[in-house]
Amino acid sequence: MELGDGTGIPILYEDRSVIALDKPAWWMLVPHSWQRTTYNLQAALVSSIGAGYFWARSRNLKFLRYVHRLDAETTGVLLFGKSPGAVESYGDLFESRRMDKRYLAVVTGHPKQREWTCRLPLLTDPKQVGRMQVDQRLGKEAETHFTVVRGGAETTLLEVRPRTGRTHQIRVHLAAEGHPVVGDSLYGANKGPLGELGSTESRPTSLKNRGGPDEGEARLRRAEAGRAQKNMEQKFPLALRAVELSYLDPFSKRPVRIRADSLEFLSAFGFAEE
């Protein structure tokens, strides 16, 4: 699926009622008045349909609207309905908790438990627009299940299954437990998404402060590593990726499982398979 600015978005799944996209980072669905951005995904899709882009024209698409939301920095599976009726029917699956959602998250530190459920209630932070907070008295019900997949030197890879869909739910729950998502400047440490993992300063001492061809090659390697790191930070600014949606189709009643590839994400944060 190609947008007006040339951005190509992979289609993960499609049937008569819905299209699932692999949402790239930075694209927002409903920017608020205080969020000045041209990365409005819903508006870009509507514009592309109106302009008669091939992907829309070939499907005879006249309508496409998001069924649920992902944060701007979060990548992965995002579902769109091809009609108002589809948006309503699939939206009911999310509202009634009949839509199973699975994420991967890389967090700072190492949780003490291998598996646990967080049920801290959440409420909009009255002191900061666009931010959520834990509020035991007035907060709305929120539930997230976490499972440790693998531990790294300073970070941990988690499988995350949110039962409810509050704004920033996964990020707030993890931050509240002392393990914020890597790259989360809103709820965690204000560090780059790769932190120390991709630092080019870890080069061998023998290559430091040396002249001649060896130093030139070392500088070239460091420059290439720096560019690769920057590109990866742009692609995955937040170590949170929606990797799967599973549900019973409300029309055909058949089971559906939609998956997004996770290999590049895992590699970006040091958890590539051996």
Image: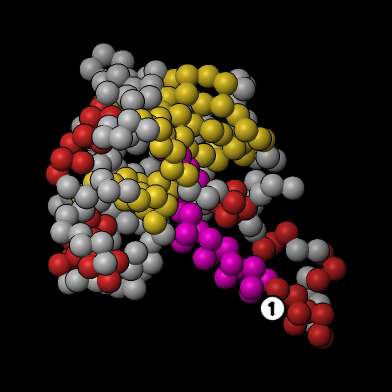
Q: Residue furthest top?
A: 137
Q: Nearer the viewer, residue 155 or 11?
A: 11
Determine which residue is flagged by label 1: 220
Kind of residue at badge 1 = Leu
- The image shows residue 74, relative to residue 174, as above or below, that is below
Q: Residue furthest right?
A: 206
Is residue 193 visible from the viewing direction of this image?
A: yes
Is residue 173 visible from the viewing direction of this image?
A: no
Q: Is residue 184 left or right of residue 251?
A: right
Q: Residue at x 46, y 54 (%)?
A: 237
Q: Which residues are magenta?
A: 222-245
Quarter of the picture holding the N terminus: bottom left
Q: Label 1 crowding class (10 Å Cα cut-off): few <14, some 14-19, many 20+?
A: few
Q: Residue at x 25, y 27 (%)?
A: 95
Q: Is residue 168 left or right of residue 34?
A: right
Q: Is residue 60 magenta?
A: no
Q: Nearer the viewer, residue 93 or 120?
A: 93
Q: Is residue 158 left or right of residue 203?
A: left
Q: Residue at x 39, y 56 (%)?
A: 11
Q: Position of residue 212 (x, y in %)?
A: 82, 85
Q: Position of residue 189 (x, y in %)?
A: 48, 42
Q: Residue furthest bottom?
A: 212
Q: Nearer the viewer, residue 69 or 66?
A: 66
Q: Is residue 237 magenta?
A: yes
Q: Position of residue 271 (x, y in %)?
A: 65, 46
Q: Nearer the viewer, residue 113 or 104?
A: 104
Q: Residue at x 17, y 55 (%)?
A: 63
Q: Across the whole image, how many numbered discs are drawn on residues? A: 1
The local secondary structure at tag 1 comes to helix
Q: Position of residue 207 (x, y in %)?
A: 81, 71
Q: Is residue 5 left or right of residue 234?
A: left
